[in-house]
Image (cartoon, rainbow, N blue to C red):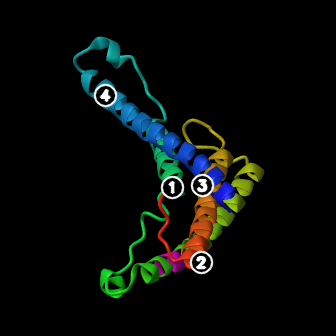
Amino acid sequence: MTTLQNLLDAVVRVLLWLAGVALVAMMFVTIVDVVVRNFGEYIPVFREIRLYGILEVVRYLFLVSMAGTMPWGVEKSQVIVELFTQKLSNTARARVDSFFLLGFTVFGGFMAYALVLSGVHAINANETTPDLGLPMSWIRFFAAFCMGLMGLRALLIGIQGLRRGELHVA
């Protein structure tokens, strides 16, 4: 399972990098849009520039940044009531945490399944984004891939935590 975990961690790190690039691109696109709109009153060249689909671009870059980070942060984002676990030993805490990770496995699986069905529907309906006409299917399949990785990673880390009684360190 260590080889599979290392391979999964490598793929998830690439997604994390992609999410960071998407976040920076989202900020850059927003800044360009604001500058062009606001300085159009003062600089004649900016009056001629028409930016279509900016909201759409920002929306999908945000989706890439959110979906790309979820598989990496699945074991780091656990919220367990401290009052419930504070008096438990480290081993018991790790096992409770691992048990909750199995819930993320189910959540990731359901999300991936629903997004795949939605992507197939988008292909059959030739659904595109409103402004730019991009196919919606690849956007939904990307999100499904990320949710599936989140579920798989949560499953592997949860099983290891239940078996060993140790928290996962990435």
**Secondary structure beneath disc 3?**
helix
The crowd level at tag 1 (other Cα within 10 Å; few <14, some 14-19, many 20+) is: many
Q: Amino acid at mark 2?
A: Arg
At x 33%, y 31%, the residue is: 31
Farthest residue toward the right? 124
Say which of 7 and 127 sits in front: 7
- Amino acid beneath label 3: Cys
Q: Which mark, by number, is residue 146?
A: 3
Residue 113: numbered disc: none
Label drawn at residue 163: 2
- Residue 24, above or below 7: above
Q: Earlier in the sequence, mark 3 or mark 2?
A: 3
Give me the C-alpha separation between circle 2 and circle 1: 21 Å
Splitting the image into 4 quarters, where does residue 116 fall? bottom right
In the picture of the structure, the residue carrying the numbered disc 4 is 37
Work out whether mark 1 precedes mark 3 in sequence or the reverse, and give the earlier one.
Answer: 1
Disc 1 + disc 3, Cβ < 8 Å: no
Helix, strand or loop for disc 4:
helix
Q: Marks 1/3: CA distance?
A: 10 Å
Numbered disc in front, either 4 or 3: 3
Tag 3: Cα neighbours inside 10 Å, few (<14), some, or many (≥20)? many
The residue carrying mark 1 is 72
Check residue 75 for magenta coloring: no
